Image (cartoon, grey):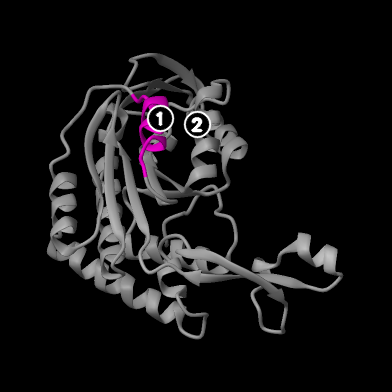
């Protein structure tokens, strides 16, 4: 549910978004925390002051004059929150990764409801854990928050292929999909994930959100201990397999997967302040730049 601490965070995040949006084009506030929420309307000739990121280079080359794409804001957009609830997501020192994902998802849901958007929710491990079809309204928002709050500990592995297929089958128009996972299960060598994520990106606006714990960077997954010469024995909490090394054996695979599929990866750690975390996210969104591989906690 929306705890007093999350209510305070929501107020601060919304205030920061409004300040950041001042002086920018209409509808920019909503795009700071999700997709643009825009439909294509026409192409017209460029005038000084237009956003160069909306340049239509094909028309520009054909007409020999700069042209931009003009969009109109949708009256109602759709946000789908997807949370991986597999075994590795229940690890964390300050809080579990599932708890962090739930808190971030709650803030996004509340912000979207204020914009009268439709909101849906999907949780998975090897199967569908929870699903709430996208709808709008305050009562619907509270229902989603209740479902998020009731997520239970799982000992199951992650089946991203199943989750991708489930989301792809959802009817309706283009959605903003926020996908929360630690992505510890991903490997470049498996074409199913790569093909599935690319297909999802083609149908919807996808934002990958990696939830992580710093113990995984230094000490391994749910159980590990230091070995000889500074090496660490890593244990995969989903498969039970062990690996000896100086760094996480899953990190290189994650990075290759992200480079191959999408640069849109936002990383959040369980010990980070939520307000600072959202500020960095919105500043990055407003700049139009790609997300760096990691957001470090503020000092």
Residue 226 in picture, x, y percent from top left: 40, 24
Whether the magenta-drawn stretch holds residue 15 is answered as no
Taking the magenta stretch, the answer to whether it contains residue 161 is: yes
The first of marks 2 and 1 along the sequence is: 1
Residues marked 2 and 1 touching at CB (< 8 Å): yes
Image coordinates of residue 157 in percent, x first then y, are: 32, 22
The segment highlighted magenta reads: 158-171
Q: Nearer the viewer, residue 154 or 246?
A: 154
Tell me the tag on residue 145: none
Residue 196 - label:
2
Q: Is residue 11 above or below residue 118?
A: below
Q: Is residue 105 or residue 137 the one in the foreground?
A: 137
Q: Where is residue 272 in the image (x, y as percent from the top left)?
A: 34, 55
Secondary structure beneath dot 1 equals: helix
Q: Is residue 212 visible?
A: no
Q: Is the magenta stretch mostly helix, strand or loop?
A: helix
Category of crowding for the residue at label 1, using alpha-carbon neighbours closer than 10 angstroms: few (below 14), some (14–19), many (at least 20): some
Residue at the spot of label 1: 165
SS at circle 2: helix
For the point 30% across and 23% down, the residue is 126
Q: Is residue 62 above or below residue 144?
A: below
**Foreground: 209 or 219?**
209
Residue sitting nearer the eye, 23 or 70: 70
User: Can residue 55 be seen from the camera position used here?
Assistant: yes
Query: Which of the 4 image quadrants contains residue 213?
Result: top left
Quick check: 102 left or right of 69?
left
Q: How far apart are marks 2 and 1 (CA)?
A: 7 Å
User: In what quadrant of the picture does the C terminus appear?
Assistant: bottom left
């Amino acid at each position: 549910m929306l705890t007093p601490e999350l209510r305070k965070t929501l107020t601060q995040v919304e205030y920061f978004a409004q300040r950041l949006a001042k002086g920018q084009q209409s509808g920019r506030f909503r795009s700071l925390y999700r997709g643009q929420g825009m439909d294509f309307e026409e192409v017209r000739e460029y005038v000084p002051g237009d956003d160069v990121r909306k340049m239509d280079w094909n028309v520009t080359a054909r007409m020999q004059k700069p042209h931009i794409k003009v969009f109109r804001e949708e009256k109602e957009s759709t946000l789908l929150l997807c949370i991986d609830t597999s075994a590795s997501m229940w690890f964390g020192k300050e809080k579990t990764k599932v708890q962090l994902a739930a808190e971030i998802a709650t803030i996004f849901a509340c912000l979207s409801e204020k914009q009268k958007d439709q909101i849906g929710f999907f949780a998975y491990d090897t199967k569908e854990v929870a699903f709430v079809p996208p709808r709008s309204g305050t009562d619907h928002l509270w229902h989603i928050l209740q479902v998020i709050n009731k997520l239970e500990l799982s000992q199951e592995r992650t089946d991203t292929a199943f989750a991708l297929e489930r989301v792809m089958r959802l009817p309706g128009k283009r959605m903003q999909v926020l996908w929360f996972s630690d992505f510890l299960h991903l490997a470049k060598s498996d074409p199913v994930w790569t093909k599935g994520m690319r297909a999802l990106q083609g149908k919807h606006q996808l934002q990958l959100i990696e939830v992580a714990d710093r113990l995984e960077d230094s000490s391994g997954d749910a159980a590990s201990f230091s070995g000889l010469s500074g090496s660490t024995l890593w244990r995969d909490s989903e498969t039970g397999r062990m690996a000896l090394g100086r760094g996480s054996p899953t990190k290189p695979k994650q990075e290759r997967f992200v480079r191959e599929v999408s640069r849109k990866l936002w990383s959040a750690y369980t010990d980070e302040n939520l307000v600072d975390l959202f500020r960095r996210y919105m500043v990055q969104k407003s700049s139009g730049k790609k997300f760096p591989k990691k957001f470090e906690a503020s000092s």
